[in-house]
Amino acid sequence: MQHRKYPFIVGFLIVPLVLYITFVIWPYLQTFGYSLTNWTGESQNFKFIGLDNYTALFHDSVFRTALWHNILLLIFLPVITILLALFFAFMVNVGGRSTAGGVQGVRGAGIYKVVYFFPQVLSVAILIVLFGAVYRSDSAGLLNGILVKLHLEDANNPIEWLNDPNLVLWCLLAIQVWAGVGFYLVLFSAAMQSIPKDIYEAALLDGAGRGQTFFKVTLPLLWDSVQTSWVYISIFAMDFFALVSGLTPGTGYGGGPDHHSEVMATYLMRNFLSFGKSGYACAQGVIIMLVTLIVSAVTLRVSRRDRIEF
Amino acid sequence: MTSPITEAQSGGLLGQVPAQGGPGSKRRSPEEAGDGAGGRVLNVFSHGFLAIWAIMIVVPLLWIILGAFKNNAEIGSSAWSWPSHWSFGAFSRAWDKGIGDFFLNTVIVMVFSVPLTMLFGSMVAYVLARYEFPGNRFIYYLFVGGAMFPYFLALVPLFFMVKNLGMLNTYQGLILVYVAYSLPFTTFFMHSFFKTLPTAIHEAAVLDGASHTRTFFQVMMPMAKPGLLSVGIFNVLGQWNQYILPVTLMQQQSSTDKDHSMLAQGLVNLALSQGYSGDYPALFAGMVIAMLPVLVVYLSFQRQVQAGLTAGTLK
């Protein structure tokens, strides 16, 4: 047995490992190296320039704006998504008619979950086409159409959602919330189902009501899932490339009007594919990763509590 | 994770005591009568909120599907216009405008990339889960760790790596990249699956003289079918919807280079060029064509999709 084990292990690992290192690990490592050079991408002639790219980044006002927008998204996207998902998870699982001796989920909970989850399986390309039409800047857009119908705005003076510097980022945020809530609803529901029944029975016997049970029993036991969700949504908040480049005005990967929806990812792509500043773009990639890692570490650290085993 | 989420289970969640009568029971216990009025208010309240969000999900989608049957003037005049005559003209225009080619390109890539992902991912996961050897943990973390970083970190060198291999805007280049980037999750998922499979059958196969390779393909893979299905659907949806990788790697290199755009990428290009050609019904029809396969997969494998996707976060 033993003498035939190693050829087998090597045989199974070698091809996937080579593929993975070539296309994933090695480019990740190269990004760090190139971020210290003035590489333009076309030629292989480049100089080591130390941390110049990074100091340049901090004097680059467009990059600072983009970073600020990502930070706004990092704060608001997880808060809004998780609160809504928890609210709906509570409604789906606890909001039903009372039956003898207990509380139960609403009728049709399964259908709600299927519908809510659906946007999660749609490609971001579909979201772009869909919300391009929803946010259309004349009264033929769905949102403006609804507001006109409700007499909340003048048909001749509609809101230009994606051209309005103060609204554009929030419109994009709303798309991600729309698409994401169902996923976290299902995640939280699954976590709720895994909580053993006798804990609830005990709470019930002690005379706890529905709301009390939720805040004092369910929520603390869901803490791990909330934490994971927060990290996961943060990674999404650092992206936003597709939505910004597909929906907002501006030449070369959007970001308009006048950088009001610029995020780090779109600025990276413009530097790399339009401006030919590959080294500079790599430095931005490193910053994106650093922010992601810091946010994940801080989230896990700050929200750490004694783990409740059950 | 894989257990079906049913209404009955939701009901049991808050400790319903069956002895006091099921949901259909007309008999009321004293303490339930007290909670009854409040419960009914909450029930109406929660149905109301749930219904509003459900409408917010469904209405925009239905509105776009309706838009595929309108003509340009109807779309441009008001959000509330109704198609004057129902025809599938926009669908065939969308198909001819490139959606058909993009659809085919995506299918060609995925016919190779999904099975290869599953094969390589299972091979790595199996070896790492079932065999002890030096470096096992290291390779495991190498694979799983790759899932933690955003694609953007690798994008620039990846572009030049593919370029140097002469595989920009080629199917084989994108297939290899898709496989490589799908490996971390596939390996992670299948690793935990192979860990849970009983060892007795494996040992019996070895005692009967089956080689390691044969044991894997003829004994272990059939046993891993439920896991393969979950992660396979996950990969189908993930690769079908992939956007950033094709945008970077599948651009035409010269005017004579064939357009090998993937569906998601082609659809966005079509949307961005709408300002010039202005055929909105065709654009909406293109969106419906792109959405249809996903909808079918989602509705038929709804349970596995939810289980597979949520398992991805719970690592």
Image (spheres, coloured by chain):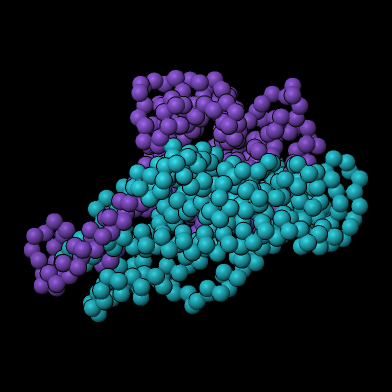
- Say whether residue A60 is left or right of residue A299: right
Q: Position of residue A242 (x, y in %)?
A: 60, 45
Give the camera-side residue of B5 and A237: A237
Q: Which quadrant would the N terminus of chain B be assigned to in this image?
A: bottom left
Give the camera-side residue of A301 and B267: B267
**What tint does the image give chain A?**
cyan
Q: Which residue corresponds to the image point at 46% horizontal and 49% vertical from the top-left?
A: A179
Q: Which residue corresponds to the image point at 78% horizontal and 36% vertical from the top-left?
A: B163
Q: Can the viewer see residue A54?
A: no
Figure disc tally: 0
Give the camera-side residue of B65 and B223: B65
Q: Position of residue B210 (x, y in %)?
A: 57, 41
The correct choice, above or below, for B107 with respect to B40 in the image is above
- Say whether residue A53 is left or right of residue B296: right
Q: Can the viewer see residue B253?
A: yes
- Say whether residue A224 is left or right of residue A248: left
Dividing the picture into quadrants, the one containing residue A89 is: bottom left
Q: Which residue corresponds to the image point at 59% horizontal and 41% vertical from the top-left?
A: A246
Dividing the picture into quadrants, the one containing residue A250 is: top right
The correct choice, above or below, for A310 with respect to A7 in the image is below
Q: Position of residue A31 (x, y in %)?
A: 77, 52
Q: Position of residue B112 (x, y in %)?
A: 60, 32
- Give the residue at the far left of this rendering: B27
As drawn, the chain in purple is B
- Give the residue at the far bottom of this rendering: A206
